[in-house]
């Protein structure tokens, strides 16, 4: 960067003359706006005399460039309803969407909002369960990724849907523990009231580019935001939006009876075979060629070269939602692939995150 340098020259008191003027200004090739910088001192020689030069180098502060988001975040509403003033919706539908032999129950539920909770695909809402905690205080809210498009399952923008797994486990004392909010939600009957907060979140918003490649990696109920994306892409008509890119979904579950929204996704694939790819990873029932269990990263490894080529494009977006462990497995796949091109994967992933092309919501 060009800089202006001002040098103040001090001579010893015994010096009578010198070929240097007592104050000299040196200008670099291009003069720029000045910004104060540290003062430096250095001894120099002029006509055989030692002199002391004090130089202050000034440089131009880089212009602040406002970052333009690649996400469809225009007009996004955040926190319209807060815990102290939640919206009261009603349960319209609540149905179990896992088989009876599945390891755990997952339910799909629809709540009325009357259009008062305007959300966008990829956002979340909070739910405050009824009752009080062990200290006699109202329960705190729990956040859930929204599983419906902005139009809602009924297409009238007056509902919001969730995908919730009933949490039941045995603690170290051998006691059965039930998750407060998940059990509250899974037990809801149509007509029951629900206290809703939000909507919140911008991390998982869809990209603006309708020609983008969107790679979706979900485990279990992490499928929720991807169902909302895919409904908008393939089941709805929008005057201002038509998806012409590629949506590629990887869904990992323990058993085939745990595959969530399977029929919906298969219909989407039939409807848009050139724009939608679908891969399941069923860990307890499927294995790869080496006999290893088929986790989501195991399935992705079958397409590793193709996925890496996609990740080198600036209009490819990765969305990951679900169990935290899958990110490490995916990193292991990409490290060696990136190394073939002389690229440090972890550094490259950081650049993708900065460009909003690597989006993670794990737990």
Image (cartoon, rainbow, N blue to C red):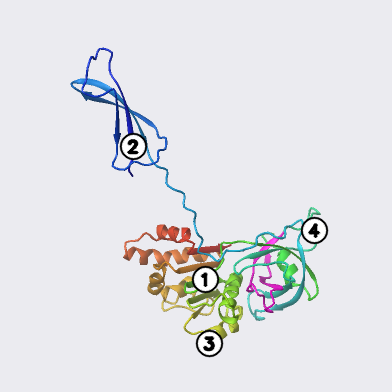
Q: Label 3 to label 2, Cα distance in Å?
A: 66 Å
Image quarter for residue 343?
A: bottom left
Relative image position of residue 82 (x, y in whole percent): 72, 58
Q: How many marks?
A: 4
Reading the chain from its start, which is encountered first: label 4 or label 1? Answer: 4
Q: Which residue in the protein does label 4 denote?
A: 132
Circles 1 and 2 in contact, beta carbons < 8 Å: no
Give whichever of 202, 186 is nearer the camera.
Answer: 202
Q: Which residue is at a point 59% across and 67% down the rendered structure image?
A: 122
Residue pictured at 49% horizontal, 56% vertical: 67
- In the image, taking residue 26 as reference, residue 349 lies left or right, namely right
The quarter of the rendered structure image containing the N terminus is: top left
Measure the alpha-carbon separation of dots 3 and 1: 20 Å
Instruction: Answer whether labels 4 and 3 touch (C-beta < 8 Å).
Output: no
As for residue 147 lying within the magenta part, the answer is yes
Instruction: First in sequence, mark 3 or 2: give its number.
Output: 2
Q: Closer to the N terminus: mark 1 or mark 2?
A: 2
Q: Considering the numbered disc 2 on the image, is that residue within a helix, a strand or a loop?
A: strand
Q: Is residue 56 above or below residue 333?
A: above
First in sequence: mark 3 or mark 1? Answer: 1
Q: Nearer the viewer, residue 361 or 268?
A: 268
Q: Which mark is on residue 4?
A: 2
1 or 2: mark nearer the eye: 2
Q: Does the residue at mark 2 contact the one at mark 4 (Cβ under 8 Å)?
A: no
Label 2 – label 4 distance at C-alpha: 68 Å
Q: Name the mark on residue 270.
A: 3
Q: Quadrant of residue 303?
A: bottom left
Q: What's drawn in magenta, residue-wise?
A: 141-169
């Amino acid at each position: 960067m060009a800089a202006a340098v001002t040098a103040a020259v001090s001579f010893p008191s015994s010096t009578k003359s010198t070929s240097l003027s007592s104050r000299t200004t040196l200008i670099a090739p291009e003069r720029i706006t000045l910004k104060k910088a540290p003062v430096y001192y250095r001894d120099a020689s002029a006509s055989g005399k030692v002199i002391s030069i004090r130089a202050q180098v000034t440089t131009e502060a880089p212009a602040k460039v406002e970052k333009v988001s690649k996400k469809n975040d225009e007009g996004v509403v955040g926190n319209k309803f807060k815990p102290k003033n939640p919206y009261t919706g009603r349960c319209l539908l609540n149905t179990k969407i896992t088989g009876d032999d599945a390891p755990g129950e997952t339910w799909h539920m629809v709540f009325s909002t009357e259009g008062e909770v305007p959300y966008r695909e990829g956002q979340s809402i909070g739910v405050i369960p009824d009752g009080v905690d062990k200290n006699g205080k109202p329960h705190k809210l729990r956040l859930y990724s929204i599983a419906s498009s902005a139009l809602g399952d009924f297409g009238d923008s007056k509902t919001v849907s969730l995908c919730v797994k009933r949490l039941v486990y045995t603690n170290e004392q051998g006691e059965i523990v039930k998750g407060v909010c998940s059990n509250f939600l899974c037990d809801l009957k149509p007509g029951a009231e629900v206290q809703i907060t939000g909507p919140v979140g911008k991390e998982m918003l869809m990209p603006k580019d309708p020609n983008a490649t969107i790679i979706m990696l979900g485990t279990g109920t992490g499928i929720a935001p991807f169902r909302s994306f895919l409904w908008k892409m393939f089941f709805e008509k929008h005057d201002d939006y038509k998806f012409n890119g590629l949506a590629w979904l990887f869904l990992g579950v323990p058993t085939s009876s745990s595959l969530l929204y399977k029929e919906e996704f298969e219909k989407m694939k039939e409807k848009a075979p050139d724009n939608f790819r679908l891969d399941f990873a069923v860990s307890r029932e499927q294995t790869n060629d080496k006999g290893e269990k088929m986790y989501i990263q195991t399935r992705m490894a079958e397409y590793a070269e193709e996925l890496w080529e996609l990740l080198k494009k600036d209009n490819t977006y990765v969305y990951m939602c679900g169990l935290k462990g899958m990110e490490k497995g995916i990193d292991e796949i990409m490290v060696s692939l990136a190394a073939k091109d002389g690229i440090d994967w972890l550094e490259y992933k950081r650049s993708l995150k900065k460009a909003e092309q690597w989006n993670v919501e794990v737990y």
